[in-house]
Amino acid sequence: MFIWASFPSVADTWELLTAASENKVTYIPGQAFSVYYDQRNSRRLNFSNTDPERIHEGIRRLAKLIRNTIRS
């Protein structure tokens, strides 16, 4: 299963990808699945192969990165 998630435009998926990986959470930038080049704030999240606790932890880590980016 996948979720398509869009975030505020300041949360560039390509710029956050390295920081996300360093925090043990990752995603596929939405631009890789879109015909619209301006989808830099969207990402595809996969949750089909993990337990609910790990999903919650991954979302928590990702949310923290996005909040920090928005505040910058």
Image (cartoon, rainbow, N blue to C red):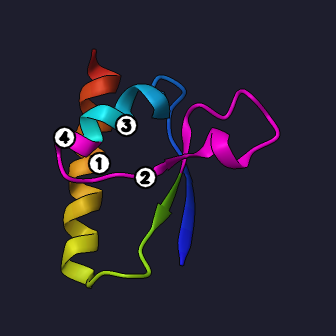
Q: Residue furthest right?
A: 35
First in sequence: mark 4 or mark 2? 4
Q: Nearer the viewer, mark 2 or mark 1?
A: 2
Q: Spatial distance from mark 1 to mark 3, Cα to Cα?
A: 10 Å
- Residue 64 placement (x, y as % from top left): 22, 42
Residue 10 colored magenta? no
Q: Which residue is mark 1?
A: 62
User: Is 24 placed above or below 20 here?
Assistant: below
- Residue 65 placement (x, y as % from top left): 26, 37
Is the C-beta separation of discs 2 and 1 under 8 Å? yes
Give the number of the disc on residue 17. Answer: 3
Instruction: State the residue at coordinates (29%, 48%).
Output: 62
Task: Give amino acid for label 2.
Answer: Tyr
First in sequence: mark 3 or mark 2? 3
> What range of the chain is rendered magenta?
21-43
Classify mark 4: residues with Cα within 10 Å, few (<14), some (14-19) or many (20+). Answer: few
Q: Spatial distance from mark 4 to mark 1, Cα to Cα?
A: 11 Å
First in sequence: mark 1 or mark 3? 3
Helix, strand or loop at mark 2:
loop
Q: Which residue is mark 2?
A: 27
Helix, strand or loop at mark 1:
helix
User: Is 46 placed above or below 15 here?
Assistant: below
Is the C-beta separation of discs 3 and 2 under 8 Å? yes
Q: Which residue is mark 4?
A: 22
Instruction: State the residue at coordinates (31%, 33%).
Output: 18
Residue 20, quarter of the rendered image: top left
- Residue 56 placement (x, y as % from top left): 24, 69
